[in-house]
Image: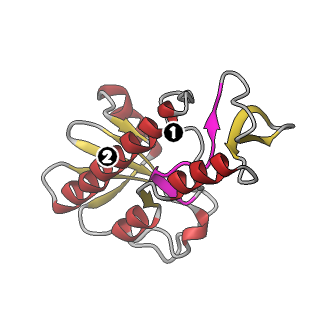
Amino acid sequence: MFFKIEKGCKLFDDFMNIINKILSVDEVALDLVKEFNGTELNGYIPVRSPFQIGGGVRAVVFDVNPGKDWKLLNKKKWNNIYCPNTRTTNGKNIQKRFDDLPYIKSDEINFLLKIVKDSNIGHPGWNIFDNVILIETHDYVNYDWYTPVDGMVEITTKEYKQIEETNGVLETN
């Protein structure tokens, strides 16, 4: 399902407040990643908890093996993503710094839009433009029960694509 939220309504402002919080905690997390000489992955924090939409770090992408204080996350799937090795003192300290990072949970968006009954299924996707926010919900969620919140209008796939094509994206998730 696709929805739009137009600028000028309270929902647009509330959504943008959450986006600004996400950007803020992402900046803090990315600074820590860079402190360890980690690299960005397409401009995003490399790896965080699946139920976090901002901030937080679980693992870091490195161009080269970062040493004994880090362990490879999954050798078969990812050959350059490492998490702290908590068997070393420094690895424990790194993990503590990760644990202390601020983060934003998926629930902030879910509760605002009242889209997801169970936060274990993640959050909707969004594209933010100057005057409109587009929301794309997951296909595997049963929406028989869902009624869009005030300020949110259901649109067709065609309308969604037209808005995407005629606007400059500010923020995507």
Q: Secondary structure at mark 2?
A: helix
- Is residue 60 highlighted in magenta? yes
Quarter assignment of residue 72: top right
Where's residue 4, x and y in %? 32, 51
The extreme top residue here reads: 63
What residue is at 31 percent from the left and 58 percent from the top?
Answer: 153
Residue named by callout 1 = 45
Callout 1: few (<14), some (14-19), or many (20+) C-alpha neighbours within 10 Å? many
Nearest the viewer among 73 and 117 is 73
The answer to whether 8 appears left or right of 40 in the picture is left
* 77 versus 7 height, above or below: above
* Residue 70 numbered tag: none
Magenta span covers which residues?
51-62
The answer to whether 143 appears left or right of 149 in the picture is right
Mark 2 and mark 1: span between their CA atoms?
Answer: 12 Å
Q: Visible in this render: residue 148?
A: no
Nearest the viewer among 56 and 120 is 56
Q: How is the image coloured?
A: secondary structure
